[in-house]
Image (cartoon, rainbow, N blue to C red):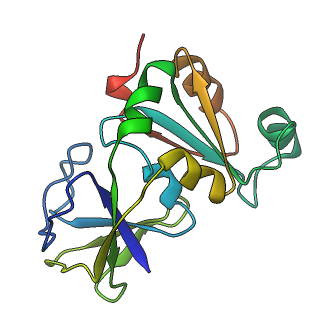
């Protein structure tokens, strides 16, 4: 199963569209797999950084970034977004896997170049509760930029989402 998350509960069909960060790509419908779905348990514009181990992650990086947690993934956002996350009404769309192809395995991204009708849509409820149920450590930070800079040279997988909205 693949998923799409939105604050709009009324989407009847997803049509391919250009990706704002990858304008050279042909228009597509984007989806995420179950394992990486927690990266999208946030309001759309919320800046966040998610990171997790890969098979090739070094023991030094694992110790440095996961030395004091048993979580499978860490997702950080900024303190100023906490209230908006608590109040957000987010919906998960269940999408059929057949028309999708993997765009980036490490990130769990899938794309389709045709319109997709969701199989069902459900409210997410309490987003922080959903994160904890998914074995994610949720961190609040004054600024994401120190974490951003620290992760760039690691062997971890990281996704830095909506960083244009992060505080400087």
Q: Residue 58, position in %: x, y?
A: 82, 46
Residue at x 37%, y 37% (from the top left corner): 87
Q: Residue furthest bottom?
A: 98
Q: Give whichever of 127, 98 is nearer the camera.
A: 127
Count up the numbered dots: 0
Q: Residue 154, position in %: x, y?
A: 69, 37
Residue at x 14%, y 64% (from the top left corner): 10
Q: Quadrant of residue 167?
A: top left
Left or right? Give the position of 44 relative to 166. left
On-image quarter of the C terminus: top left
Q: Examine the rendered structure and indicate whether residue 17 appears above or below residue 118.
A: above
On-image quarter of the N terminus: bottom left
Q: Residue 102, position in %: x, y?
A: 41, 73
Q: Give whichever of 151, 30 is nearer the camera.
A: 30
Left or right? Give the position of 127 relative to 101. right
Left or right? Give the position of 47 relative to 55. left
Residue at x 70%, y 44% (from the top left corner): 155
Left or right? Give the position of 123 relative to 105. left
Q: Give whichever of 19, 89 is nearer the camera.
A: 89
Residue 141 shows in this picture: yes
């Amino acid at each position: 199963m693949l998923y799409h998350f939105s604050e709009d509960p009324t989407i009847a069909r997803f049509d391919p569209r250009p990706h704002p960060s990858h304008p050279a790509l042909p228009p597509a419908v984007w989806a995420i797999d179950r394992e990486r779905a927690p990266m999208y348990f946030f309001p759309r514009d919320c800046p966040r950084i998610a990171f997790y181990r890969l098979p090739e992650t070094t023991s030094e990086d694992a110790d440095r970034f996961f030395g004091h947690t048993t979580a499978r993934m860490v997702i950080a956002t900024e303190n100023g977004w906490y209230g908006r996350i608590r109040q957000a009404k987010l919906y998960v769309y269940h999408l059929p896997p057949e028309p999708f192809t993997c765009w980036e395995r490490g990130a769990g991204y899938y794309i389709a170049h045709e319109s997709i009708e969701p199989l069902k849509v459900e409210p997410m409820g309490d987003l922080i509760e959903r994160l904890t149920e998914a074995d994610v450590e949720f961190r609040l930070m004054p600024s994401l930029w120190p974490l951003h800079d620290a992760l760039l040279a690691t062997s971890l997988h990281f996704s830095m989402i909506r960083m244009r909205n992060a505080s400087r």
